[in-house]
Image (cartoon, rainbow, N blue to C red):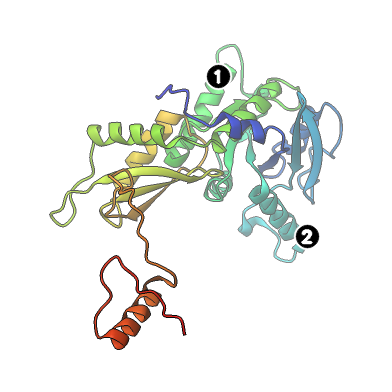
Amino acid sequence: PLTDDETYNKKSAGDDKEKPLQLAILGRQNVGKSTLVNSLLGEERVIAGDKPGLTRDSIQVPWLWKDRPVQIVDTAGIRRGVKRERLDEIEDLAVLDAMRAMKLADVAVLVLDAQAQYIQRQELSIADSVVREGRALVVAANKMDLVVDDQYTKHDFARAVQEQIEIRFPMLRKTPVVAMSSLLGHNVKKLMPTVFEARDRWARVMPTGVLNRWLHDVMEEHSPQSQAGRATKIKYIIQTKGRPPTFLLFCNVSELPVNYLRYLTRHFQDSFNMFGMEVRLVVKKSDKNPYGNKSNKKQFVGIGGWKGRQKRMIAQLKKTGMPTKKGKRGRRSKS
């Protein structure tokens, strides 16, 4: 991994700290989302209980964590469409409200239930929606007190959850996972540092020099295969925006093979620790090199541009029968 001091723009990160971090708490019904919110706040701010579906509307709670503003949104449990009651419009609206909160968030925390033992399809679907929407993802593996003992530690539990996610969803490999018990308050304090680290990585602005040094190393290690008998070249890379991190690859072809783009994405994530989010690499065909020699000579066309110059040349030709000499402009005669 690169350890260059320029791996992110500190000024940009400093500006972000003044803005409230938008944090959405997502998950299936009865996995402990509201209990987690109360545990983080240190008080009973939202209704929590064993009965599924207690939370119907997304509840926004402003909060200061170590003098850093946070806007927590507790959302309703999201069930698969086939499991919802057909005529229950309230649940449908609650799910839409939860997805809306996710789209407005900087970081989404997906709460899992350790009792289920395996990650459910609906939870994978929620994780997929978070990443596709361009948000940063953190997983809270809740109710660890029900599975952790002397032989099976919280680190084993977190690693097992991470491996399950990677097997079933390779795009989300090494996603940050925090094992906890929100009811007992065990390890809940580890969540917010992980969330802020995820937000900082998500909002990172990468210097162009660092990006192109990384690209040079990648191309030396493994270059893309030729297309139509022509060597494929990636000339340079720039970052077009953050949130989510989006990069533009200038190539001599209009598209790169899918497997090579996956290779670039994995290498980029490993180099810059960009896990738990989608890294968007966009290919653009370009035959020009912006770092090539540029002429400093200014091209003066004259008033009105080329069309104005053409009109003057025609007028001069009609008047004198001679074309205007190159580099000289005929003076207007005083009438």
User: Which residue is denoted by mark 1 in the rendering?
Assistant: 155
| Label 2 crowd (10 A; few <14 / some 14-19 / many >=20) | few
Q: Secondary structure at mark 1?
A: helix
Residue 95 in the image: above or below residue 202: below
Residue 32 in the image: above or below residue 288: above
Find residue 272 and report its image quarter.
top left
Taking depth in this image into account, of 79 and 195 the one nearest to the observer is 195
User: Which residue is denoted by mark 2 in the rendering?
Assistant: 90
**Residue at the limit of the structure toward the top, as seen here:** 150
Look at the numbered discs 1 and 2 and tell me whether their residues touch, using CB distance below 8 Å.
Answer: no
Q: Is residue 107 visible from the viewing direction of this image?
A: yes
Taking depth in this image into account, of 283 and 128 the one nearest to the observer is 283
Residue at 51%, 33% in the rendered image: 175
Q: Mark 2 or mark 1, which is nearer the start of the sequence?
A: 2
Amino acid tagged 1 = His
Q: Is residue 114 visible from the viewing direction of this image?
A: no
Residue 291, given in percent of the width and then of the height, sits at: 32, 43
Residue 297, given in percent of the width and then of the height, sits at: 33, 51
Find residue 321 and report its image quarter.
bottom left
Q: Secondary structure at mark 2?
A: helix
Residue 169, given in percent of the width and then of the height, sits at: 45, 42
Image quarter (top left, top right, bottom left or bottom right) of the N terminus: top left
| Label 1 crowd (10 A; few <14 / some 14-19 / many >=20) | few
Tell me how far mark 1 sits from mark 2, CA to CA: 39 Å
Residue 229, given in percent of the width and then of the height, sits at: 12, 54
Amino acid tagged 2 = Ile
